[in-house]
Each structure stands twice: as structure tokens, then as C-alpha cells.
Image: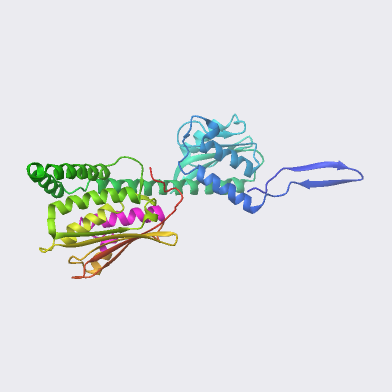
């Protein structure tokens, strides 16, 4: 696209020389293209009061530079286009025609092309000037692909938020009832312990229903885990044995809210409470090179490995929702190479391993 620069002809006696501006470096074109795709992640609606700072406005300026056009406009399904360069007089009618008919339209050196996302018009690209038709068409296809990627990413983020809401809504009424009943039993006999348990209960609830950002630190997640385990020990007594070992260097690691707490709760509910004699839960966290590795292990009844695979695949209804949601959220944030690893067998307990990068761009605790 960047090769369509204007030619300049000069008189240079005794012969005429033809000069053409050099085509931009391919690496530079790719860098600009990547920046445009990033600008369009949120769609074609303006997202800043200052047009100079608006990503759509930045995108049209970059597109105009790449095409060497007199003017470039990008329009959504409603409203006026965002322009780089002077808007041609014919542009408004062409945009409305393309929105209505879904086909390319041109007049007076101005071309309007539909941006098709999954076969439907998602917007209009308008180009004014002497730009080859093929370049305009390829640019429209590429912009449409950028819009589709943005929609897919937005859908994935919305799904992740929905799964987080599902986890927050999954606080066990049975556990809450037992915890409050246990706290009440200490009000007269041991008021100091009752007070401490109330504070632990408040910390557990606060973290579980937090409405802040998407990420917390490992230290923040473990404060809620310790509060939960304190309450669980108060409820289960000697039936629950707990061992927690976390290396100090991983405490500042940022990770999604409720990435670990549901796994610990799962170990207590399905690993310890199902055994009459109770059992143990071990939680460990350490640095392994550039990664942080956390393991939650119980000595409960375990599960069939095929069932564990079905849980992670989301093929079980209700059972294992916490494991499924945490696994999906980790993969959405860090990539498909991350997620949960479940080591289990019937009668052999369960060990769930979480491996996350110690540093990840965009993952910052609030």
C-alpha cells in the first residue's frame, strides 16, 4: 500500500529526469499497520473528547499516510466519519449509499468501500485521491479484519468477566451458614476468638465480591485464602489440617482475582469434607525462573482422570465450575500454554498446579 507515492517530474537540461519517492521500508509499514490495528480494537466509535487523542482519529491519519491519499475517512454504522485531510463534498452521500446497499460506491475521485465483518457491513472506508482501486480494496479488507479481531477480543474479555462474576456468585451458603454458626458459638465462651473470626469472615467476603480491577497480587489473594482457611478450621476443627508455604519473592506477582481462592475452597469441600476423618490441604508457591508456580494439594478421594479432563473441557454441568472458570480465565490472560494442570486418581487425592509468568504486560494489580 505504501508504494503508491506521488511522482515528480522536473526539467533538468539537456534531458528530463523522472524521480519517484522511495517506497517505505516494509518493516516500517508493518509497524504502522500494527499500530492501526491496535487503534481499531475498540471499533469505529470515537473514544476520546480530544480528537487528537482518539484512536480512530489516529488510525485514519496513519491510513492516509500509508495510502498517500488526499483524504481518508472511517465511519461506523451511524454518525459522520473520522477524517484525515479535507472531507470531500461527495463523501457524505457515498457513505450513506454504502451503509444502505453494502456495495462500493465512487464519485469525483472519491471511493467508499464497505467494511465487511462476517458478511455484514460494520463500517465504511472512504479514500479521496489518486489511489489504485486494488489498494483501496485490500486496505478495506485489512481494516475489516482488524475490527473483527477487536470484536473477538472484546467477546473473550466479556466472557472472562462473566466467568469471574460466576465465581463471585458461587460463595457457598452452606459454608457461610456454618462459619457464622461457629462464630456465634464463641461469642460467650471465647469473645476474643469470635472477634478475630468475624474479621476473617469480613476479609473473605470482601475479597470474594470485590468490584475493583481485574487483577490482584499473590499476597492479596493469599490474605483471602488465609481468612477462608481460618474459618474452615474453626468449622471443621481437627478434621482439617493445613500447610501453607509461599516464597516471599512471588508475593508481588500479579494475577487475576479469584485465581487461587476457588481452588483452595474446592480442595477443602471435595477433598477434606467428603472424608469422615478429614484430611489435609497443602498450598505452596515458588519462583521457577521467569514463572511463578502455585500448587494446591489435598489427600481426599481424588477423581477419575477422564473426569478431570472433562471438567477442564467444560463438559460437566455444575460439577467443577470453579476449576473450569479459573482454567479459562488463566488461558485468556496468559495464553493457551498456561492454565491448570490437574494430577489426580481415584483414592489418590488431587493436586492442582497453577503456572503464571512473574511479569506479564497488561497484568497489573489494582
333 drawn magenta: yes
Q: Nearer the viewer, residue 233 or 162?
A: 233
Position of 76 with respect to 310 (left or right) is: right
Q: Nearer the viewer, residue 61 or 292?
A: 292
What residue is at 62 percent from the left and 31 percent from the top? Answer: 86
Q: Nearer the viewer, residue 100 or 139?
A: 139
Magenta residues (range): 310-334
Q: Is residue 163 above or below residue 338?
A: above
Residue 341, percent across and down? Answer: 32, 64
In the rendered image, is residue 159 in sight? no
| Dominant SS in magenta | helix
The quadrant in which the C terminus is found is top left
Count of picture labels? 0
Residue 43, percent across and down? Answer: 46, 41
Q: Is residue 109 above or below residue 185?
A: above
The quadrant where residue 277 appears = bottom left
In the rendered image, is residue 249 in sight? yes
Position of 342 with respect to 87 (left or right) is: left
Question: How is this picture coloured?
Answer: rainbow
Residue 143, percent across and down? Answer: 52, 46
271 drawn magenta: no
Q: Nearer the viewer, residue 142 or 268?
A: 268
Q: Is residue 222 above or below residue 87?
A: below
What residue is at 63 percent from the left and 50 percent from the top? Answer: 28
Residue 121, percent across and down? Answer: 45, 42
What residue is at 19 percent from the left and 58 percent from the top? Answer: 268
Q: Work out which residue is located at the far right of the displayed protein and give it.
A: 14
Amino acid at each position: 500500500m505504501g508504494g503508491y507515492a506521488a511522482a515528480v517530474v522536473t526539467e533538468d537540461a539537456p534531458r528530463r529526469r523522472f524521480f519517484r519517492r522511495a517506497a517505505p521500508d516494509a518493516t516500517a509499514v508493518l509497524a504502522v499497520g500494527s499500530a492501526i490495528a491496535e487503534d481499531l480494537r475498540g471499533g469505529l466509535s470515537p473514544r476520546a473528547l480530544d480528537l487528537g487523542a482518539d484512536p480512530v482519529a489516529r488510525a485514519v491519519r496513519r491510513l492516509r499516510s500509508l495510502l498517500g491519499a488526499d483524504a481518508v475517512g472511517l465511519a461506523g454504522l451511524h454518525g459522520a466519519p473520522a477524517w484525515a485531510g479535507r472531507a470531500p463534498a461527495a463523501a457524505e452521500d457515498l457513505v450513506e449509499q454504502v451503509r444502505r446497499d453494502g456495495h462500493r460506491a465512487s464519485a469525483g475521485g472519491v471511493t467508499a468501500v464497505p467494511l465487511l465483518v462476517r458478511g455484514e457491513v460494520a463500517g465504511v472506508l472512504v479514500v479521496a485521491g489518486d489511489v489504485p482501486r486494488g489498494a483501496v480494496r485490500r486496505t478495506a479488507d485489512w481494516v475489516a479484519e482488524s475490527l473483527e479481531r477487536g470484536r473477538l477480543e472484546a467477546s473473550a474479555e466479556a466472557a472472562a468477566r462473566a466467568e469471574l462474576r460466576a465465581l463471585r456468585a458461587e460463595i457457598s451458603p452452606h459454608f457461610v451458614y456454618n462459619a457464622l454458626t461457629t462464630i456465634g458459638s464463641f461469642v460467650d465462651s471465647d469473645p476474643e476468638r469470635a472477634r478475630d473470626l468475624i474479621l476473617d469472615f469480613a476479609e473473605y467476603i470482601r475479597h470474594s465480591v470485590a468490584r475493583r480491577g481485574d487483577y490482584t497480587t499473590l499476597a492479596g489473594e493469599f490474605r483471602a485464602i488465609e481468612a477462608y482457611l481460618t474459618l474452615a478450621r474453626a468449622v471443621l476443627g481437627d478434621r482439617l489440617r493445613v500447610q501453607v508455604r509461599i516464597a516471599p519473592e512471588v508475593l508481588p506477582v500479579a494475577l487475576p482475582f479469584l485465581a487461587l481462592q476457588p481452588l483452595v475452597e474446592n480442595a477443602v469441600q471435595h477433598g477434606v469434607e467428603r472424608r469422615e476423618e478429614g484430611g489435609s490441604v497443602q498450598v505452596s508457591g515458588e519462583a521457577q525462573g521467569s514463572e511463578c508456580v502455585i500448587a494446591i494439594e489435598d489427600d481426599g478421594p481424588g477423581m477419575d482422570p477422564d473426569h478431570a479432563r472433562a471438567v477442564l473441557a467444560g463438559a460437566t454441568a455444575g460439577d467443577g465450575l470453579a476449576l473450569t472458570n479459573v482454567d479459562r480465565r488463566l488461558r485468556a490472560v496468559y495464553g493457551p500454554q498456561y492454565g491448570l494442570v490437574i494430577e489426580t486418581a481415584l483414592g489418590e487425592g488431587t493436586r492442582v498446579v497453577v503456572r503464571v509468568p512473574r511479569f506479564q504486560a497488561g497484568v497489573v494489580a489494582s
